[in-house]
Image: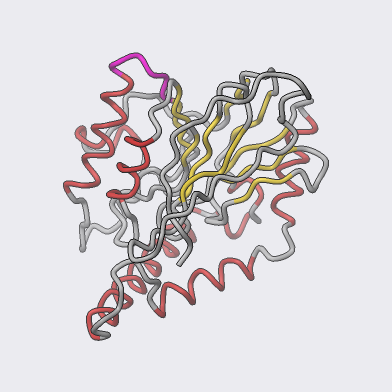
Amino acid sequence: MFLSDLHLGAIGSRPDLVLAFLRANPAATYVLAGDVLDLWQPLLPHWRTEDQAVIDHLNRRQAQGAALVWLRGNHDPDPARAPAHVRLNATPVARHVHTAANGARYLVVHGDEADSRLVRAHVMTRLGSRIDHALRRLDHGLRRLRRGTRGEARGLVEGVLITLNRLAYARRSHERRLVAMARAEGLDGVICGHFHIAGLNADHGLLYANCGDWMDSFTGLVERRDGALHLAGGRPAPAAAPVSLATPALGNVPSPGGPSPEPVPVLTMVRS
């Protein structure tokens, strides 16, 4: 399983949905592609029991024998400075090469490597985190004023943030840069997070897979027993009939006449 951008500790994160997804999709290996923690709000701490439950679940799975790989993202704090109770039982790394069950090898990075130097500057990351925190707090206030709004419906400010983010990456140059990194190392594709835009395609010659995030898209990547990658999850809308958002695997379908892939439990949700 591949997850990214949980942003535990941020006001916009949804640790309750992360935990539900983890429980619905038990895995032998958990690859966390960065931005697991977001603890940069010293004046307005936002660590909840639900955030802690996610950390405890992952550490418990690791103690039970599951592999836990953690790629440090641009929002993740220095593990040595993080409070002991929020630390994962894994040493953070900058990159990882994952070998799927079908032999395909993927470069796994957070994804901020594709950003410009200015955007990657530490001060810009901290500033962006605090601006996002303030805007989402405003959004929560506006939602309380709008009586009758479904709890899972996107708020006005949240919708604007998502639209601006998608416009910023509309040309998909970040996908091409990351695929080029994998190609230069002779790998079969790249898996990342960071951009808060879930994706699974082979449009640039190799597989590009983005886990999505747990502030806006609520998705993760699941690897089936035959090595196929599937994008699972989606924004929940409890009032509507549930529909699975798992996508067909790209470039990893079994050969004709071969065994059918074993189904993997998928948290069924629908787009709002």
Query: Over which residues does the magenta segment extend?
Result: 63-68
* Above or below 208: residue 137: below
Q: Residue at x 48, y 34 (%)?
A: 71
Q: For residue 142: magenta?
A: no
- The residue lying toward the viewer, choosing from 175 and 147, is 147
Task: Identify the coloring.
Answer: secondary structure
Q: Which of the 4 image quarters holds residue 36?
A: top left
Instruction: Please state if 9 lies on the left or on the right of 119 as rendered.
Output: left
* Residue 89 pos. (x, y %): 32, 24
* Residue 155 pos. (x, y %): 38, 76
Instruction: Please state if 231 lies on the left or on the right of 134 as rendered.
Output: right
Q: Which of the 4 image quarters holds residue 249?
A: top right
Q: Residue at x 68, y 24 (%)?
A: 105
* Residue 234 pos. (x, y %): 47, 54
- The residue lying toward the viewer, choosing from 182 and 152, is 152
Q: Residue at x 33, y 49 (%)?
A: 17
* Above or below 199: residue 23: above
Instruction: Please state if 62 lies on the left or on the right of 212 as rendered.
Output: left
Instruction: Please state if 47 lies on the left or on the right of 17 as rendered.
Output: left
* Above or below 126: residue 1: above
Quadrant in which the C terminus appears: bottom left
Q: Which of the 4 image quarters holds residue 267?
A: top left
Q: Farthest residue in the top direction?
A: 65
Q: Farthest residue in the right direction?
A: 205
- The residue lying toward the viewer, choosing from 220 and 233, is 233
* Residue 203 pos. (x, y %): 79, 48
